[in-house]
Image (tube, rainbow, N blue to C red):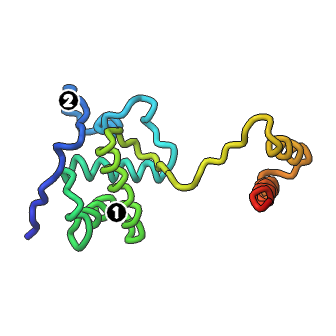
Amino acid sequence: FKKKMVGTNIYIKKPSSAPRSRNTHTKPHRRLGTTKAEQIPSSKSKCVRQAIFYHFVHVLDAPCQKHWKGHGGTISLIRKALHLDFDHNRTILSTLKDIMRCVRVGDGFDGTIKSHAGRKHIIKAGSAEEDLIATWMELHCGFRMTTPLVTHIRHRKKAH
């Protein structure tokens, strides 16, 4: 027999409870409480992440993290329910972590992948780097060739 998982559903904001018709063919975006602009996900991965979100919150009642892994865990249940392969376990885990991050921060989860990796490089207007990039781009060098050249010049400046 399966244990009933105690959820953390009280921490997740539910969409406003508008009266629903008994029609079983309602569109998923209405059940998720998204806006009209978010109706059509831009990619397959966004669709999968939204389906994971829906199943995690509304079907499984958002079980706590200690129930996510293992045989019969949240990840396994979501993967089976959505008919995903075993190689989607990492996708499901990262999506669950993103959902919980959104809960902690107070943002709504929309299925997009938010990458916080890397560092922003800002090239200041009127700088020597800007002039070099403009010159190389006018010479049709392209981004693949221009980027390493700028990096090389930055490293040379640091060495001096």
User: Measuring 24% from the left and 60% from the top, which residue is drawn there?
Assistant: 65
C-alpha separation, residue under disc 1 versus residue under disc 2 = 29 Å
User: Is 134 left or right of 11, judged from the image as shown?
Assistant: right
- Looking at the rendered structure, the kind of residue marked 1 is His
In the foreground, 38 or 13: 13
Observer-nearest of 10 and 28: 10
Residue 99 image position (x, y, % from top left): 33, 49
Residue at point 42%, 49% (across, down): 47
Q: Percent position (x, y) of residue 137?
A: 85, 45
Would you name the residue on which mark 1 appears? Answer: 83
Determine which quarter of the picture holds residue 6: bottom left
Task: Return the x and y of residue 48 as percentages of the image width and height.
Answer: 40, 53
Residue that sits furthest to the front in the current view: 160
Q: Nearer the viewer, residue 44 or 109?
A: 109
Compared across the picture, whether 21 is left or right of 28 comes to: left
> Which tag, 1 or 2, sits closer to the chain's start?
2
Q: What residue lies at 37% left-to-right and 52% top-to-bottom? A: 98
Q: Which residue ends up furthest to the top in the rendered image?
A: 19
Q: Which mark is residue 17?
A: 2
